[in-house]
Amino acid sequence: MASLFDRLPEGPGRTVRRRRGVFLLPSLFTVGNMFCGYACIVYSMSDKLEQAAPYIGIAIVLDMLDGRIARLTNTTSAFGVEFDSLADVISFGVAPAVLAFEWGLKGLGQVGWAAGFIYMSAAAMRLARFNIQSSAQLDKRYFIGMPTPAAAGLVAATIYAAPAPPDGHAQALAALAIMVVPAALMVSAVRFRSFKTINFGWGPSYGPLWIFILFVAYVAAGPRISLLILAYVYLLSGFVELIVTRVRARRDLRRAAAPQP
């Protein structure tokens, strides 16, 4: 059955309502992102870690969609940018810190408290640095520093693959490492590959779309192991990129210092 608005004639009022609805669409995805972070915190505090970790993964997907939808509908705004950053602080800063604390940092006492706070602070600093960088200074192919969704995904994938709390001093140190290492990478100058420039079917080429379909099938076949592998491969990719960058810089210096014929 057609709605009342469908029976109304076209006019300025209906156009304004449509425009306002489209403008709010990216913010709805941001609200969903923020809700996932809140749900992760609630489940973590209830010792339901296996249920809490997937909410960070859902938040990552929603965070990817709100920016793309805003660009596709031409509804980007300063409010949307700030709202998205505040939601990211909750979903990719506070929620992973609480999740990791309830999983393995609790047994370390004040050291565990400090590790969670360091991670949360690094995530907030990473988001603030990203917001103040102008588009002219950014190479869209790379992130400077590990992006906060990837860092949170690393924590969530580790705990989702092994939800039982660590037993012993060595395992507690491993829990400490998954907090400190991503925190250091988020505030570093290490470059990580960005996937924003990849076409997932919005353009005339369907090759990337098939790659995305295979990726979804790969994750669905064994989400615990596949997500864990993806998280740590992306972590290692930053170090590979660092090595490649330094090798290229040394090669360019040798070429510049070589005598010209």
Image (tube, helix red, strand yellow):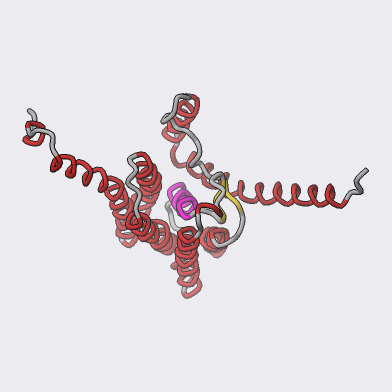
Is residue 159 magenta-colored? yes
In the image as oriented, which residue stretches furthest toward the front?
12
Vertical relation: 15 (above or below) 177: above
Give residue 101's position: percent from left, percent from top.
43, 64
Q: Nearer the viewer, residue 135 or 171?
A: 135
Vertical relation: 246 (above or below) 124: above
**Residue 48 visible within the image:** no
Give residue 217's position: percent from left, percent from top.
44, 30
In the image as oriented, which residue stretches furthest toward the bottom?
110
Residue depicted at x 81% and y 52%: 253
Query: Viewed as shown, does residue 138 lie left or right of 46?
Result: right
- The kind of secondary structure the magenta stretch mainly shows is helix
Q: Quadrant of residue 145?
A: bottom right
The count of marks equals 0
Residue depicted at x 9% and y 36%: 5
Is residue 174 magenta-colored? no
Query: Viewed as shown, does residue 140 lie left or right of 159?
Result: right
Give residue 113's position: percent from left, percent from top.
45, 71
Q: Please identify the quadrant where the N terminus is shown.
A: top left
**Residue 35 visible within the image:** yes
Residue depicted at x 53% and y 42%: 229
Vertical relation: 27 (above or below) 202: below
Residues in magenta, as a range:
148-162
Q: Please identify the quadrant where the C terminus is shown.
A: top right
Residue depicted at x 42% and y 57%: 92
Vertical relation: 32 (above or below) 184: above
Q: Nearer the viewer, residue 68 or 6?
A: 6
Give residue 154's position: percent from left, percent from top.
49, 51
